[in-house]
Image: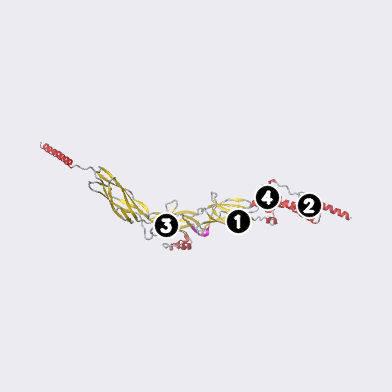
Amino acid sequence: MKKYLTLCFVIVALIATLPVAGVAQSPFPNARDDSYPLLGLKRAKSAYQQAQSEFQRKQKLFNKDLISLKEYETARNAFSNAEVNYQQSLLVLLFEQQFVSIKSAVKSQAENGSKKVTVSLANTTSATSEFAQIINMEDELFRSLQPDVIHNVYVSLSNDDGAIISSPYEIKIDEIRSGKPEVAEFELLQDLDEVTVNIIYGNGASRNPKVFLSKDASANKVLIQSEQFSQEVELGTTASYGLSLELFSGSDNIYKLEAVNLPKSATRYFNENGGSARVSQIKFTESTNTRNATLQVSLPDRPTDDVPMDEPINFYVVAVPRDKSDTFNEGRGEIWSRQELEDLGVGFVQLEMIPRGAGRLVVKAPQLFNNYKEGQTVEFTFTVVNEGSRRLHNIEFELDPPFEWEKTIEPNIISSLGIREEQTVKLYLTPPEGLSVGRYETRMRSTALSDNQPVNAEDKTFTVQVDAEASMLGTSLILLIILGLVSGIVYFGIKLSRK
């Protein structure tokens, strides 16, 4: 009886060691699993569960010495392969489902004037409901793969030409967890309102959305920039300062433009680029957060107490919101400091103007033509005037007289001539003996220095007319003949009238 029981037990053990159909080997991979990773995951999970169950059963039998080590190793290898296939299918689907979204891209300006962009990135990976049904979200293997984490996210900003315009050029975010957005801060190397955000993450997936940068509304001001922030302006002319105005506000959209700390003798007004109409306020719209304007500053013709030459004049252009206009108007006409404007919380930019003067040499000659009388010197008189805005120095005159003519200018050099001052100069020309009949011209060039810069006046040409010498005897004979003819006509006229 004992031998019979022992034999039965061995038979049962041998039956138990036989492979279960469809379990000993993993199912052959389906060629369409690459196109349908969700179906591949179903297949891999089923094979994993069967291999796991078979391995657990073989492990119990091996612990009781009912199967050989080789059978045990075969079951363990099959389970390991099924587990790897399952993990691979999970990873394929997880990487396919990964997605990094841009929550916001906010543009702001730092205290040093540089523009910054803060990009907020979120892990918006979400499995489908079918995926959630296939996988137990609490499964240890599934959790070990960290489906809610995207690793190695690289971010950069570029323009329409594909050039990177962010500093640093690229930022690496080690991981982005679901529900915990990460922030990347850049400095803009090119001031743009639209940029392309380049994102590379996971196993090489990438996105390149083009976004419109929103403005930091917390600043609640208009940021002003000017490329021509410092200019040398000649007295009597108008300087133009191009202004770029960018709105960083979520409430006010109308701002008043003011230029403060300018001299009273300097006129100023604003106009929008492309238009001649003067403006005092500027309005932003939902679609336009950047506007361009121009400040025109006209200086007086002459230096004044508040417009000294060669001394810089610093002033500010201010964009005042409506809720702060009353406070600003209370200080109208006063000198504003940078700290006061910062305390008021308005947008402003500091500009500089250096008044310059230039002398203008003008020669006024009432007579440029004269007749020559034998034995005399021809005299011309002209006036030298400084019609500019700076003193003239070393005024000289250069003459090109005809051959062998003598020239004299009094004075030949004028050492200095102030603004609106004038001085009379005389020119003497003496021709040589035996001069032929005709017209003779003498060209005069006038030069001077103003602020060590050469100044030239318009050239003047003086003309001398030389006539032929008249003969006294011939003239007397002609006069006698004329008198005789007149007398004869009168005599015969009287006789004829008496008849």
**Res. 50 in view:** no
Circle 3 is placed at which residue position?
A: 353
Give the CA separation, mark 4 to mark 2.
35 Å
Tell me if 497 is positioned left or right of 372 in this view.
Answer: left
Given this view, does label 3 or label 4 mark the residue nearer the observer?
3
**Which residues, given as a range, are shown in magenta?**
216-222
| Residue 241 horizontal/vertical position (percent) | 44, 54
Is 434 magenta? The answer is no
Give the CA separation, mark 3 to mark 1.
47 Å
Mark closer to the chain start, 3 or 1? 1
Circle 2 is placed at which residue position?
A: 70
Q: Foreground: 498 or 74?
A: 74
Mark closer to the chain start, 3 or 2? 2
Give the CA separation, mark 3 to mark 2.
94 Å
Mark closer to the chain start, 1 or 2? 2
| Residue 100 horizontal/vertical position (percent) | 61, 53
| Residue 449 horizontal/vertical position (percent) | 35, 54
Mark closer to the chain start, 3 or 4? 4
Q: Foreground: 248 or 182?
A: 182
Q: Residues within 10 Å of mark 2 (few under 14, many from 20)?
A: few
Q: Is mark 2 on a helix, strand or loop?
A: helix
Given this view, does label 4 or label 2 mark the residue nearer the observer?
2
Label 4 close to label 2 by CB (< 8 Å): no
Circle 1 is placed at which residue position?
A: 173
Give the CA separation, mark 3 to mark 4.
71 Å
Instruction: In the rendered structure, find residue 38 and report the number of the disc placed on it.
Output: 4
Q: What element carries label 1?
A: strand
Could you tell me the amino acid type at mark 2?
Answer: Lys
